[in-house]
Amino acid sequence: MLKVAILGGSGYAGAELARMLLVHPHVELTAITSERLAGTLISDTFLNFRNTDLRFEPMNLKAIEVKADLFFLCLPHKASQEAVAHFHAAGKKVIDLSADYRLKNAGVYEKWYQTPHMYKPLLKKAVYGLPELHRAKIKKASIIANPGCYPTTAILGLSPIIGQDIVDRDSVIIDSKSGTSGAGRTPAQPFMFCEVNESVKAYAISVHRHTPEIEQELSGVAGKKLNVIFTPHLIPMDRGILSTIYIRLKKSISLSKVQKMYRDFYRDEPFVRVLNNGVYPMTKAVKGSNYCDISVFLDKRSGKGVTLIIVSAIDNLIKGASGAAVQNMNIMYGFDETSGLASSPPSP
Amino acid sequence: MLKVAILGGSGYAGAELARMLLVHPHVELTAITSERLAGTLISDTFLNFRNTDLRFEPMNLKAIEVKADLFFLCLPHKASQEAVAHFHAAGKKVIDLSADYRLKNAGVYEKWYQTPHMYKPLLKKAVYGLPELHRAKIKKASIIANPGCYPTTAILGLSPIIGQDIVDRDSVIIDSKSGTSGAGRTPAQPFMFCEVNESVKAYAISVHRHTPEIEQELSGVAGKKLNVIFTPHLIPMDRGILSTIYIRLKKSISLSKVQKMYRDFYRDEPFVRVLNNGVYPMTKAVKGSNYCDISVFLDKRSGKGVTLIIVSAIDNLIKGASGAAVQNMNIMYGFDETSGLASSPPSP
Amino acid sequence: MLKVAILGGSGYAGAELARMLLVHPHVELTAITSERLAGTLISDTFLNFRNTDLRFEPMNLKAIEVKADLFFLCLPHKASQEAVAHFHAAGKKVIDLSADYRLKNAGVYEKWYQTPHMYKPLLKKAVYGLPELHRAKIKKASIIANPGCYPTTAILGLSPIIGQDIVDRDSVIIDSKSGTSGAGRTPAQPFMFCEVNESVKAYAISVHRHTPEIEQELSGVAGKKLNVIFTPHLIPMDRGILSTIYIRLKKSISLSKVQKMYRDFYRDEPFVRVLNNGVYPMTKAVKGSNYCDISVFLDKRSGKGVTLIIVSAIDNLIKGASGAAVQNMNIMYGFDETSGLASSPPSP
Amino acid sequence: MLKVAILGGSGYAGAELARMLLVHPHVELTAITSERLAGTLISDTFLNFRNTDLRFEPMNLKAIEVKADLFFLCLPHKASQEAVAHFHAAGKKVIDLSADYRLKNAGVYEKWYQTPHMYKPLLKKAVYGLPELHRAKIKKASIIANPGCYPTTAILGLSPIIGQDIVDRDSVIIDSKSGTSGAGRTPAQPFMFCEVNESVKAYAISVHRHTPEIEQELSGVAGKKLNVIFTPHLIPMDRGILSTIYIRLKKSISLSKVQKMYRDFYRDEPFVRVLNNGVYPMTKAVKGSNYCDISVFLDKRSGKGVTLIIVSAIDNLIKGASGAAVQNMNIMYGFDETSGLASSPPSP
């Protein structure tokens, strides 16, 4: 049994991660930290937890390092920088769910996150943990930068096509709709029930921090630097992200050929499903699961020629956070990639 | 007091219209029809109604034509064709909330609605009832084609800019998010609570019937035929539409200049509010009101140059249907344009 | 025009009150306070507000007392004690939406609110502002203690029957279900969207502070001291309270006779509607309105004999707070009692 | 591997059952029927399904009887009568999720369900499938009448106390709040999103068909016939039932003693959790799981003496339907009782 620990377990991502690790067949969860809740049972905070006597403990890096071989970090960005470095120096493996090691270019990180990066050499060692793009590197990695939730939908939605000559790489527009759990558990006025319920709004237009992460990965696939327009929206539901992605085609192509490109690209992927012709992804169909559903459509009416419209859907807390982390762990340690992630989600 | 009647009053739009007309200072609601509910009190179906003994009556055009001078038609498209013609022939005025008289080109109507138009000459007489564009014509009209809900957000969002040389008119993408009341009151599996709740999906990509309506009006403003990409989404709330609209600029311009263009365009409009710099529209702020909130943003990062991002929000049942109908009536009859529409909506 | 001011206007009740007062035909809203938001436009915080340049100002009792003749206090309990006394001493009238002057017995207040009452003589002068019970006293009052939201449903639901010999006054059980706006706008973890959505829970069983308020008023109607069992629940919606009330009957009586008692009791009430036989109240039917809907049912199967089951529904922010305050003002100043409150609410 | 089949698989309960059976370690799901969807993939209707090529087939009892040893019936009441009899005659075992074999007294069934019972002798053979009460009989049963959702909360909430001398058995009031999935997938106006959302209502007061089922089981535990008052409510969420149960005590007892009685009663139960003192059950904590959470409270203020208030929460589709069916199967076939049911549910 692999010994693992979670740092920063009082948020939604940490809790979902703990829930999955507690029933994972090859893993023992030995510790979970929370400064605020130290000493209390995790089942007192998360009433959905069963059959565990695990308690939150304070975050003492030195004390906790001996308890596990793999550390999941669910800390705020910036705080994660040092913790990753600490465990790496101690010879441990790390899966970091924060944004601290996702951006390869420290300058880009510093510009978007408004804070210096103190461990630049480690950036090179960190692998961006999207298995569909980087599985081979993940296998050998000691530091995984677990992808952001919005980027997962955008990168999986565009990867099969962004490197093809038929697309205008500079024309990408990503219009995303997210449930509210992405905003975290910390109380804040805009995420109170009465503010979110019965409303929809856009936010952070052109300035959302997931933008450079999307661009880095898509540029990598395309083999050419590109920028995207990314608009996130907040909608009144707990979980799920649906991204509607627009990209101009330079020449016309049949929808069935595009669908084939997507099916071929994801043929061996256990967690990406290219839906049948005309079927629309909906977040409820992936809620509670590690799946990403994708469907493609062509618009041929526009004066700019043909536009490919891709719709992708994930559960932001699973494929967009904790499930992806478990998937990365499975790959790193040679477990079956679907271990602990295989079941269909409840519905409705 | 102007005598008015509603045909097809058992749906959400008809009910909201009746509610507003019952307290309108210059109007007497003399009749409301429903085949299925004929003979019953409207307050038995719509429990929110107070202080009215009005009953639904069957839809007998001949019998009802003597009861009013202005007729609001909340019938399904196709059924409205004949009813409009009937009342028009009888010398009455009509505000038609269906799509039957919105499209000036009968061929376009027949293609998108898959049914012949039997009253083509009347199409020329009908005025597209968006006061912000056609107020002068509405004043003198005898047939008003009341705009669709999605088109209202798109047309109001783009009208101040679509005719300007700085924009690439062929680049319009409209990504809309709608509450569920737009789907009507008739039972259908996809709109059951457990199907809609906790989920978001796109639908009718590239084939939604509101597309030609948006194109007709924007082409009119632009003075040049144009097509748009329009993607509607269903989100888990009762009321409200938020549209996020993307249009490429041919040359750069400051955000404050764009904001000024919008403010100038809507300076005298009682129901369009251009929000302050950086303020995001949210549907909850317009829920229950006849307002359209608009905010504009610039994205300068994209490889295609600068993109203008416009966000517009309305209550689909008011500014997107019944409120617009009342506003049109106010204009036609010389009432104060805000009569019966002036109050701020409840919140949250 | 009566000059009025609101103290503590940054919460939901204060905002709804301001919204109604701004369009009230006999009233001028001259000031609204908020320490935190002082200097900002109220329309910047409450985006639903239109056509007002009103700004929040700091709460300086001395400075504000000259601005109005009637003061609405939306302050936290305890803070309201002094403010009421201040305006009363200055010869002004006050409608206090807090709990500070609702309980006639200072000892009961001190026990349930865990704080001393510093202005006991004023308790005698304050009138409990439920028009259906105390209209004559409200007319002459200078201090109104505006009722709590839960108590309004319970007291209106039981008043027609609690003084009758046929009921067992000691058997009252009130099981209430409330939307989330009752918890206020201040950020708190239990009222975050993801905590409230898709869940229901009971809270404060046997210890909710509205209990003694219910008991005081029902004891008054019954002419005999009584206690009740009161269980509040939180459900995932913005607005509305539904109370299901159980009371044993000492002898059998026909349902139609009970219905007649209720109809007679509320015959002249503009805002209480006794629903038709078999019609169930639902909060959506009163959302946005000052109405209380009531329906009665008899259970004859129980081994304890016949039980009367009363269901009552209100909008907690209107009939349960701000609307009731406006109704009280209308009575105090001889305005039409429905001024500013008459319209049917939007639906759905 | 046990071969099982589902009859009537197009509803929510059937789908959840199929989902659980597809990953159950000891079971092979060989067939699932739906008249309407015959021939189509179940994953086309239930998008949450993965990794299955199972198709709906028509409901031909003769043809399907050879395909399995255990049949789960998710048919409407009345239709289930004959199907149960058919499989029983064929020597197969049956778990019936309808109400047809729950009531031991055919007269009671006929009165509440307004239809004759054609297979009265089988009623004696059927075992009411609540493991916490009838585990020994379930082990040997060939026909299981799977409990209703509301009754599960009421019976589990009251069983530890209803047979004790300290309670007044005739005083039981059960006030239940249910999500909307209990109403099924068939389109109907009252369960459309816009009707359910942002509202709460009571329904079927004193006439709900789950009443006699609750009474039968509680009478059995108490050893004395008793009636209860049962009031169901519909609230705006997908899944979950919370029941708040009131029962008078004949003499006072400490809360800790009551808690001990509950803990002792459920000591060995894998799926009932008696919460810590003062912790309130919430449906979100059991959503997606087979657990029933229970908490007890005492009210000592009432004029009727002490009242015990019990709050119980389940997921209506799991512990209230499909999960209970799987639990019953596990018991019948000697599998570990938690097989396929053990994991903690996702949250939020």
Image (cartoon, coloured by chain):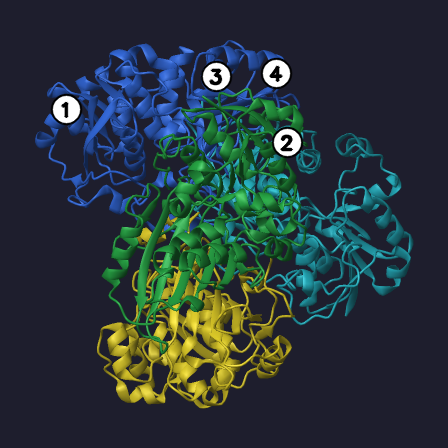
Chain colours: A green, B yellow, C cyan, D blue
In front: C14, or D65? D65
Q: Which residue is denoted by mark 3 in the rendering? A: D169
> What mark, if any, has residue D255 been given in the picture?
4
Task: Give the camera-side residue of D30 and D282.
Answer: D30
Q: The residue tagged with tag 3: helix, strand or loop?
A: helix
The x and y percentages for residue D287 are 44, 34
* D282 to A116, vertically: above or below: above
Q: Which residue is mark 2?
A: A34
Measured in 3D between alpha carbons, the distance from the residue under mark 1 to the one under mark 2, in whole angstroms, is: 55 Å
The reply to whether callout 4 and callout 2 are in contact (CB within 8 Å) is no
Callout 2 amino acid: Ser
- Residue A189: % across, % down: 65, 50
CA separation in Å, label 4 and label 2: 32 Å
Q: Quadrant of residue D104?
A: top left
Q: Give, as a three-letter code, the residue at label 1.
A: Phe
Chain containing mark 3: D
Q: Given the current orientation, which residue lies at the most extreme left position? A: D62
Chain where mark 2 sits: A
Query: Of the residues under marks 4 and 3, which one precedes in the sequence?
Result: 3
Q: Name the mark on residue D87.
A: 1
> Residue B94: percent from the left, percent from the top?
38, 81
